[in-house]
Image: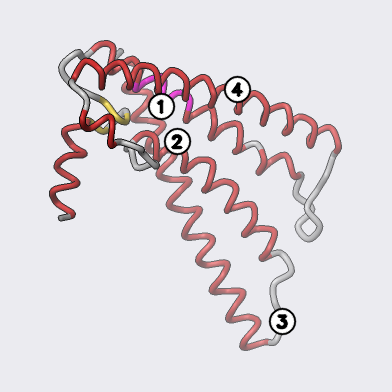
């Protein structure tokens, strides 16, 4: 379990790097394109392509990061009112089902990336193969599946705590709610 948590920590740094620099690059692209259009009267031909690429990358790597820190959409009214044992069972079932759904989506998206690779499609302005940035879709789904399966393992091995994310306990969420009030 320690090795898995260490690997998880390494994945966190990769995700944070991709997300941080992806958002910064999108901002730089938008600002640079706006300045170019305003000052020089010409837009960058590649700006839309790069923006779309970065949006795909940030979106699908972001779902894994959101699962890690339990900052995804949660319907928790019944969960919050349930006793500890029911909460554990709910977390087992939801983590297991979500993990397998994410693995299936990773498989389907990997098949799509392979199809795009075989078609040899490229972007119009930069001439970059389309599969290169589409490959972040199955990667994001796979990382998310790993997060949910890790959440399941954490909840199985630690009977006292309720893990909503691999780095977020239910007790941490309660403190967040009080802090925002």
Sequence order check, earlier mark of 2 and 4: 2
Specify the label residue 104 is tagged with. 4
- The residue wearing badge 3 is 42
* Real-space Cα separation, disc 2 to disc 3, in angstroms: 37 Å
Give yes or no for contact between labels 2 and 4 (Cβ–Cβ under 8 Å): no
The residue under label 1 is 147
How far apart in space, not on screen, are marks 2 and 4 (Cα)? 15 Å
Quadrant of the image occupied by residue 86: top left
* Residues in magenta, as a range: 145-151
Q: Residues within 10 Å of mark 1 (few under 14, many from 20)?
A: many
Whole-number angstrom distance, CA of label 4 to CA of label 1: 14 Å
- Local SS, label 3: loop
- For the C terminus, give its image quadrant: bottom left
Q: Residue at x 57, y 67 (%)?
A: 29
Q: Depth check: 65 or 99 in front?
A: 99
Residue at (71% x, 64% y) in the render: 46
Name the secondary structure under disc 2.
helix
Q: Main secondary structure of the magenta part?
A: helix
**51 over 3 or under it: above or below:** below
Q: Crowding near pointer 4: few (<14 within 10 Å), some, many (20+)?
A: some
Which circle's residue, 2 or 1, is located before the other in the chain? 2
> 116 left or right of 22?
right
Q: CA distance from mark 2 to mark 1?
A: 7 Å
Residue 133 placed where, x, y %? 66, 44
């Amino acid at each position: 379990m320690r090795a898995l948590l260490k690997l998880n920590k390494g994945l966190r740094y990769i995700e944070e790097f991709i997300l941080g620099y992806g958002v910064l690059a999108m901002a730089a692209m938008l600002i640079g394109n706006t300045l170019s259009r305003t000052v020089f009267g010409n837009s960058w031909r590649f700006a839309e392509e790069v923006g779309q690429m970065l949006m795909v990358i940030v979106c699908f790597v972001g779902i894994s990061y959101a699962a890690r820190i339990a900052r995804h959409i949660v319907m928790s009214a019944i969960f919050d009112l349930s006793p500890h044992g029911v909460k554990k069972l709910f977390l087992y079932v939801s983590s297991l089902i979500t993990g397998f759904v994410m693995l299936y989506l990773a498989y389907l998206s990997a098949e799509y990336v392979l199809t795009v690779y075989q078609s040899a499609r490229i972007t119009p302005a930069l001439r970059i193969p389309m599969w290169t940035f589409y490959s972040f879709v199955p990667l994001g789904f796979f990382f998310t599946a790993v997060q949910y399966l890790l959440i399941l393992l954490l909840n199985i091995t630690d009977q006292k705590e309720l893990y909503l994310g691999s780095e977020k306990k239910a007790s941490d969420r309660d403190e967040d709610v009080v802090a925002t009030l």
